[in-house]
Each structure stands twice: as C-alpha cells, then as structure tokens.
C-alpha cells in the first residue's frame, strides 16, 4: 500500500515537471523570407515587413512566449520585451527608425549570447547556432510591430 501511494506521489510530481512543456527551441521556418547571408547584420533589415512579422510572431509564440509572455506582454517571469523600444514608439520618421536600430544590436547580442546575473546565474540561454539571422530578425520585427501597436 505504501509503495503504491509513494509511486502515485512520484508520478504526480514528475507530471508537474513536464507541465512546462518542451523547452527545446522550435525551428522557425524562414524559407519564404529574403535570405540575409552568413554575415550578421547590426540592424534589422526586416522591420515593417508584415510577412516577416507573421513569421516572427509564430517564432515568438513557440520560443519566447513561455517566459516573455503571450503577444509579447510579460507575465512577470522575464522582462517585458515591449519595454525594450517603448521610447521609439513616440518618435516618428528617421528618429523612430534610429531608435529601433539602436536597440537591434542589444537584442541580437542577448538572443545569441544569453544573459546572466552579476552572480553568473543564467537568466536567458544564448541561441547562437540555434536560430538563423533571419529567425532572430523576424522575431525582432514582430516585437517592434507589437511595441508600436501597444504604444500608438
């Protein structure tokens, strides 16, 4: 009897561990997007492209939303990515584009190399070698579009 109860308890605990789902990065299909080549760009060449934003939205949903929140609105687990470029939303024209570009390099570096606390604890893994340049910039195009939607 005790073994059965203990076995059931362990089964319940292990189910809880799997509740977070598959944390393996999901591939982002960028085959329909203009290919950017091997050399990484410093700024997002896709910004404002609706087709790219749709690809980025799908990639975000499967790879980022678990921590950064659905629709790029944080639930508190990880930073709210809409705040990354929120100041850019109030600008217009070249000023807005320059503002978004300034944030592109930071975004790219964090996605590729991850982030750690000052004590060395990893708060975000790096995805260098996992996501293509097209995938990273598609997700950023989606986040920038959501930033503008939420902050008209």
Image (cartoon, grey):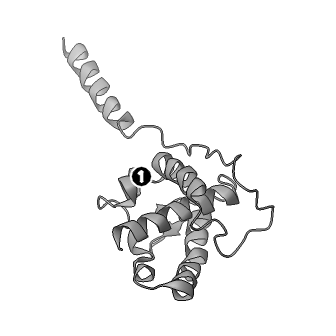
Residue under the image location 57 percent in, 64 percent down = 111
Relative vertical location of residue 40 with respect to residue 54 in this rendering, above or below: below
Single out the residue that lies furthest toward the top: 1
- 47 vs 81, left or right, is right
Q: Nearer the viewer, residue 94 or 130?
A: 94
Do we see residue 151 in this rendering? Answer: yes
Q: Nearer the viewer, residue 80 or 93?
A: 93
- On the image, which quarter does residue 19 sit in? top left
Do we see residue 81 in this rendering? Answer: no
- On the image, which quarter does residue 20 sit in? top left
Point out residue 27 in the picture as x, y percentages from the top left corner.
61, 44
Residue for badge 1: 65
Query: In the picture, which quadrant includes the N terminus?
Result: top left
Residue under the image location 55 percent in, 71 percent down = 107
- 2 vs 112, left or right, is left
Query: In the picture, which quadrant includes the C terminus?
Result: bottom left
Q: Residues within 10 Å of mark 1 (few under 14, many from 20)?
A: some
Point out residue 81 in the picture as x, y percentages from the top left corner.
42, 67
Q: Nearer the viewer, residue 21 or 138?
A: 138
Relative vertical location of residue 10 with respect to residue 126 in this rendering, above or below: above
- 147 vs 102, left or right, is left
Residue under the image location 53 percent in, 59 percent down = 125
Single out the residue that lies furthest toward the bottom: 95
SS at circle 1: helix
Point out residue 79 in the picture as x, y percentages from the top left corner.
38, 67
């Amino acid at each position: 009897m005790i073994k059965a109860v203990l076995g059931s308890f362990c089964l319940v605990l292990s189910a809880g561990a799997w509740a977070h789902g598959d944390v393996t990065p999901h591939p982002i299909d960028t085959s329909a997007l203009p290919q950017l080549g091997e050399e990484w760009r410093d700024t997002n060449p896709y910004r404002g492209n609706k087709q790219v934003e749709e690809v980025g939205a799908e990639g975000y949903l499967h790879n980022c939303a678990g921590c950064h929140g659905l629709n790029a609105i944080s639930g508190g687990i990880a930073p709210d990515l809409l705040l990354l470029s929120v100041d850019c939303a109030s600008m217009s024209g070249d000023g807005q584009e320059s503002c978004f570009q300034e944030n592109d390099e930071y975004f790219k570096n964090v996605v590729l190399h991850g982030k750690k606390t000052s004590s060395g604890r990893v708060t975000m893994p790096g995805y260098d070698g996992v996501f293509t340049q097209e995938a990273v910039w598609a997700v950023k195009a989606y986040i920038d579009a959501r930033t503008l939607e939420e902050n008209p």
